[in-house]
Image: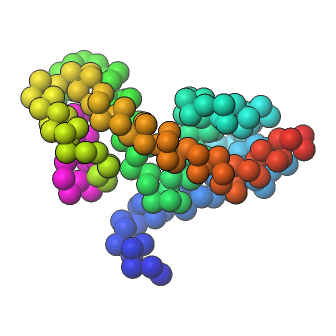
Amino acid sequence: MCRELESLPITCLERAKELKALFRSFLQKPDLSISHSHKTDKIRLNMDEPLKWRQSFENLLSNQHGLCLFRAFLVSEFSEENIAFYLACEDYRITKPSSKLSAKAKKIYEEYVCSDAPREVNLDHETKAITKKNLERPSQSCFSLAQEKIYALMEKDCYPRFLKSITYLEISQQVKAG
């Protein structure tokens, strides 16, 4: 086993395996449906969904199946922290009541933004400093700049690689084959 994988927490490795299995389940089902182990029902992948994902990064992220596949792809590339941070920021923005903002902001900052954070995202020094300053008076927008930077990074870097990935291409071929 790779030394890098040995250093990951076992829960992280288990989650990566789960996502990888789910990722593969798209390809193994002729009707492009997903079976969830916790549910007896199937979630059907609409045939035009993968084509919409190619139209824009926003379409991919706003679709439950697209987001799941993209996240599994990022796990396979060891960069899942980007989408995890983005989603944590989305959740933070809708936090109510505002009395919970401070604790939630601190948790997100310590998990993703501060230097040597366990899941540190790639932000420049200036963005980190602005974000840290924003934590003095937490508001729904205190992570906006950092979130925008990570979104842009994923859109410019990860999204094009996802669209070229074997899994996405195979799903697209299945859709075209109908």
Compared to residue 68, the image places residue 2 above or below, namely below
Q: Magenta span has 6?
A: no
Residue 107 counted in the magenta span: yes
User: Furthest residue to the right?
Assistant: 177
Q: Residue at x 19, y 45 (%)?
A: 125
Residue situated in front as seen by the camera: 176 or 160? 160
Measuring from the top left, give residue 143's x and y in whole percent.
27, 31
Return the x and y of residue 149 as percentages of the image width and height.
Answer: 35, 37
Q: How is the image coloured?
A: rainbow
From the viewer's perspective, tell me whether residue 153 is left or right of residue 98.
right
Q: Main secondary structure of the magenta part?
A: helix
Identity of the residue drawn at 21% across and 21% down: 139
Quadrant of the rendering where the C terminus is positioned: top right
> Percent from the top left, x then y, of residue 16?
51, 59
Q: Is residue 114 visible?
A: yes
**Where is 39 relative to 91, above or below?**
below
Quadrant of residue 105 in the image?
Answer: top left
- Give the residue at x 23% y 38%: 127
State which region is magenta.
104-118
Kindly indicate the quadrant of the structure image that contains residue 57. Answer: top right
**Can you name the residue that lies furthest to the top here?**
97
Image coordinates for residue 39, horizontal then vertical, percent: 64, 42
Is the residue 74 above or below the residue 3 in the image?
above
Q: Nearer the viewer, residue 118 or 127?
A: 127
Residue at 66% x, 31% y is 55
